[in-house]
Image: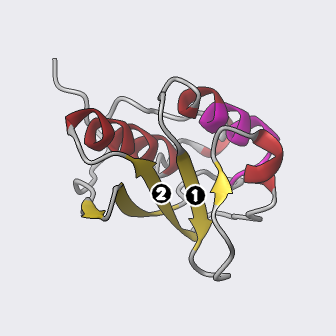
Amino acid sequence: MEEFNAPQIRTIRDYTIVNVNVGLHYGLIVMSSAHIAKESNKYTGDVFIKNVDKNSRRVNAKSVLSLMTLEASKGTKLRIYVKGTDLEARTFVQRLYSGISTEGPEDDSYYMNFDRFTTK
């Protein structure tokens, strides 16, 4: 079974924020960016991601093209910003953290598990 630590979530102004290291074997390529954009579009508020390693600007996580500009390979440190400070925002930032930090097998490098922190 995969081991992981719970994300260190914090709030600043109107945003729920978490840092995450890309765990995906090929990083944020088109397929993984599409999965993140699809997941981000489920949230009604704004969702942004920033490449901390390159000190880039925040990009819209609901846009595949914007996510591709992050040039994030495996191990890259990203910061996720979700508009809102309520339970819904905290839960959503956990879902994105879970998906981006997924370290799947090399032969299934597109696999993203957004539900690692979901309790049933």
Q: Name the residue under label 2.
A: 80
Q: Nearer the viewer, residue 18 or 22?
A: 18
| 32 drawn magenta | yes
Mark 1 vs mark 2: which is more N-terminal?
1
Q: In which quarter of the image is residue 94?
A: top left
User: Marks 1 and 2: CB-CB under 8 Å?
Assistant: yes
Q: Residues within 10 Å of mark 2 (few under 14, many from 20)?
A: many
What residue is pinned by disc 1?
49
> Badge 1: few (under 14), some or many (20 or more) residues near its Cα, within 10 Å?
many
Q: Is residue 8 magenta?
A: no
Is 81 displayed left or right of 14 in the figure? right
Q: Is residue 83 above or below residue 13?
A: above
- Judged from the image, the secondary structure of the residue bearing numbered disc 1 is strand
Q: Considering only vertical position in the picture, is 81 above or below 35? A: below
Looking at this view, name the residue that lies furthest to the top.
Answer: 120
In the picture provided, is 82 more to the left or to the right than 120?
right
Amino acid type of disc 1?
Answer: Ile
Which segment is the magenta one? 28-37
